[in-house]
Amino acid sequence: MKKTHKSITCILCPLGCKIMTIRKKTGIRVSGQKCAKGKDYAIQELLNPTRVLTATIKIKEGVLPLLPVRTNLPILKDKIFECIRNLSRLEVKAPTKMGETILKNIADTGSDLISTRDMERVQCKQIM
């Protein structure tokens, strides 16, 4: 393995440290962070980057046409597009509650898709 450099901006606190990582055969060297959390973040971002996926899905009979959702755990960055493809085919029926599981183990990530708001059902008035 040859030596590789990567610059990472830490997002764990408002400081936004510019962290430089150098990956060698002997390990990873990290510099520029102002705290231990920054070092851990940079190493994780280099070796195994993850993200919480946030999106919207279609909802039938809801007061709004789309339901905001997110994964309950971070997923591998490489799995995001596969998860989005799954979401494009997904549609739920109102009502839903915030925190309700919409889809278990999305794309075999170990993370569940959950609703991030209550969504009431549309109340139709009958015309006489």
Image: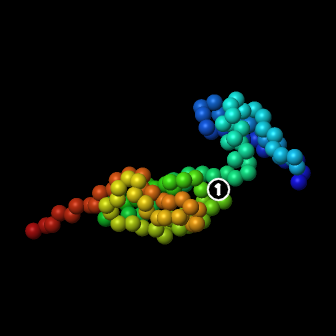
Residue 78 x, y percent position in the rendering = 66, 59
Residue 70 x, y percent position in the rendering = 49, 54
- Find numbered disc 1 in the image and state the secondary structure of the residue it sits on: helix
Q: Is residue 125 left or right of residue 75?
A: left
The number of discs equals: 1
Q: Is residue 124 left or right of residue 24?
A: left
Q: Is residue 67 visible?
A: no
Q: Is residue 18 left or right of residue 108?
A: right
Residue type at mark 1? Answer: Lys
Query: Which residue occupies 40% across, 57% down?
Result: 100
Query: Which residue occupies 21% across, 63% down?
Result: 124
Q: Quadrant of the N terminus?
A: bottom right
Q: In this figure, which residue is indicated by the disc labeled 1?
A: 77
Of residues 113 and 55, the one nearer the viewer is 113
Q: Is residue 101 above or below residue 31?
A: below
Query: Which residue occupies 41% across, 54% down?
Result: 99
Q: Is residue 23 left or right of residue 88?
A: right
Q: How busy is the neighbourhood of tag 1: few (under 14 within 10 Å), some, or many (20 plus)?
A: some
Residue 44 x, y percent position in the rendering = 70, 47
Q: Is residue 52 visible?
A: yes
Query: Which residue occupies 34% across, 59% down?
Result: 96
Q: Quadrant of the C terminus?
A: bottom left
